[in-house]
């Protein structure tokens, strides 16, 4: 007799198998000024990922806040075509959220005003990017090392955003000897930010090792503004554990939803006290992939859309039997028909593999031995002068610069 299919409540890895569902009234909506977000779940800004097509797919699974990929202020103000496309939306996206990047306060303020005039409902700002091309020029995770500079930029963003909530996202610091997140929380609160998100890894860790949720709890005790926790939310039950463990006000979901947009349906279920259904079988996932590919082709055009889709093919099929054998085809597909032809070699009746729940997709790998900083940067931490050239104006490196960071 075949083994019984796992019950919805037990389709979880051992760490989450006994996590209880949310009790009535246990959690509250995330409140960002006039915005009330339920469930208290935020899609992390990820380069090459959280464009409008994917945000729309996630939103259809369950309400929450869905942030655009990082948009550079200088590229946006210069009228760069790709920058404006990535910042764009559709009438059905409410609330509309954009993450911006900049190191020059006047640029940040000007971009914030422009986006608010376009009807954006929430602005976030990236102070957590850990990649060398950004930090070696004094941007991203390097900025919180200089609290006065951080304060100037946040103040400019808050003033430019006006009535619209302006939040920031940071990492714990550069490494374990240069921890900055508590100072960043103080600055965010003093300068009027509506909330602060913390990816509970250092820049040196990149995406390796385990996220240190205890830092989220310390930040929550340190500030009075809402704290959003980020790091290792792979399953819907992780979100409940994080909020119960740290007392944070919301969770930020990054790599856990890559190739799994239905994770947001599961999150909506557990926060509403419902048992989530098991993930879809491969046949249903193929239908989701087809829908995703069509949306990308409509948004970017057929050529760029299918190039974008190639990485998604690997993420959607990760862990299924035989998927590695067809991956060489999937990473070269140029049409939806070719994608479906490759996928036809797999068993559409195969259930989602339990091992796939916590499988790493997207950024992973080893930590950085040393975080690149400008020469002499640590000698002038009281300086509030913006760095030059912290990220190219044309956004050409965004996909390398941010992936859940």
Image (spheres, rainbow, N blue to C red):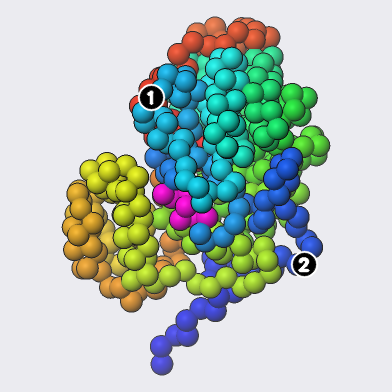
Is residue 193 covered in magenta?
no
Q: How many marks?
A: 2
Which residues make up the magenta segment? 53-59
Please state if 39 lies on the left or on the right of 126 as rendered: right
Q: Position of residue 79 (x, y in %)?
A: 41, 22
Camera-side residue: 166 or 361?
Answer: 166
* Residue 58 within the segment the image draws in magenta: yes
Q: Is residue 354 above or below residue 114?
A: below
Q: Nearer the viewer, mark 1 or mark 2?
A: 1
Q: Earlier in the sequence, mark 1 or mark 2?
A: 2
Residue 17, visible in the rendered structure: yes
Tag 1 and tag 2, C-beta contact below 8 Å:
no
Q: Residue at the location (41% across, 88% down)?
A: 2
- How packed is label 2: few (under 14 Cα within 10 Å), some, or many (20 or more)? few
Horizontal side of 148 relative to 289 (left or right) equals right
Which residue is label 1 attached to? 80
Q: The residue tagged with tag 2: helix, strand or loop?
A: loop
For residue 24, the mark is 2
Residue 171: which numbered mark, if any? none
- The residue sitting at 41% across, 92% down in the picture is 1
Q: Position of residue 165 (x, y in %)?
A: 68, 35
Residue at 47% across, 69% down: 279
Q: Is residue 206 left or right of residue 168?
A: left
Neighbours of disc 1 within 10 Å: few (<14), some (14-19), many (20+):
some
Q: Main secondary structure of the magenta part?
A: helix
Q: Determine the CA span between mark 1 and mark 2.
A: 47 Å
């Amino acid at each position: 007799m075949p083994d019984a299919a796992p019950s919805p409540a037990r389709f979880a890895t051992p760490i989450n198998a006994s996590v209880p569902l949310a009790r009535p009234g246990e959690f509250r909506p995330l409140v960002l000024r006039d915005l009330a977000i339920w469930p208290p779940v935020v899609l992390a800004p990820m380069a090459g990922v959280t464009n409008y097509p994917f945000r729309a797919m996630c939103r259809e699974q369950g309400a929450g806040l869905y942030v655009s990929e990082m948009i550079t202020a200088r590229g946006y103000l210069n009228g760069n075509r790709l920058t404006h496309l990535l910042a764009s939306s559709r009438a059905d996206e409410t609330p509309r959220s954009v993450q911006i990047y900049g190191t020059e306060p006047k640029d940040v303020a000007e971009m914030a005003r422009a986006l608010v005039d376009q009807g954006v409902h929430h602005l976030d700002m990236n102070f957590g990017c850990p990649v060398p091309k950004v930090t070696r020029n004094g941007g991203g995770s390097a900025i919180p090392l200089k609290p006065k500079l951080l304060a100037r930029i946040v103040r400019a963003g808050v003033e430019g955003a006006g009535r619209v909530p302006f939040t920031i996202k940071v990492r714990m610091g550069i490494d374990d000897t240069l921890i900055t997140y508590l100072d960043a929380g103080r600055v965010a609160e003093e300068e009027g930010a509506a909330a602060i998100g913390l990816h509970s890894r250092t820049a040196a860790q990149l995406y390796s090792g385990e996220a240190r949720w205890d830092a989220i709890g310390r930040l929550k005790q340190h500030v009075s503004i809402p704290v959003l926790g980020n790091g290792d939310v792979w399953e819907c039950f992780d979100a409940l554990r994080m909020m119960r463990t740290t007392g944070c006000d919301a969770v930020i979901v990054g790599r856990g939803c890559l190739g799994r947009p239905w994770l947001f349906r599961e999150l909506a279920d557990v926060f509403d006290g419902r048992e989530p259904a098991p993930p879809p079988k491969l046949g249903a996932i193929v239908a989701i992939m087809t829908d995703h590919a069509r949306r990308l082709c409509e948004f970017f055009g057929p050529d760029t859309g299918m190039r974008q889709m190639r990485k998604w093919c690997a993420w959607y099929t990760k862990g299924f039997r035989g998927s590695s054998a067809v991956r060489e085809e999937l990473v070269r597909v140029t049409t939806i028909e070719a994608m479906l032809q490759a996928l036809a070699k797999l068993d559409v009746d195969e259930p989602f593999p339990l091992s796939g729940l916590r499988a790493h997709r997207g950024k992973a790998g080893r930590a950085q031995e040393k975080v690149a900083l400008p020469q002499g940067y640590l000698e002038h931490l009281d300086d509030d002068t913006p760095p030059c050239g912290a990220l190219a104006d044309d956004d050409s490196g965004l996909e390398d610069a941010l992936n859940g960071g």
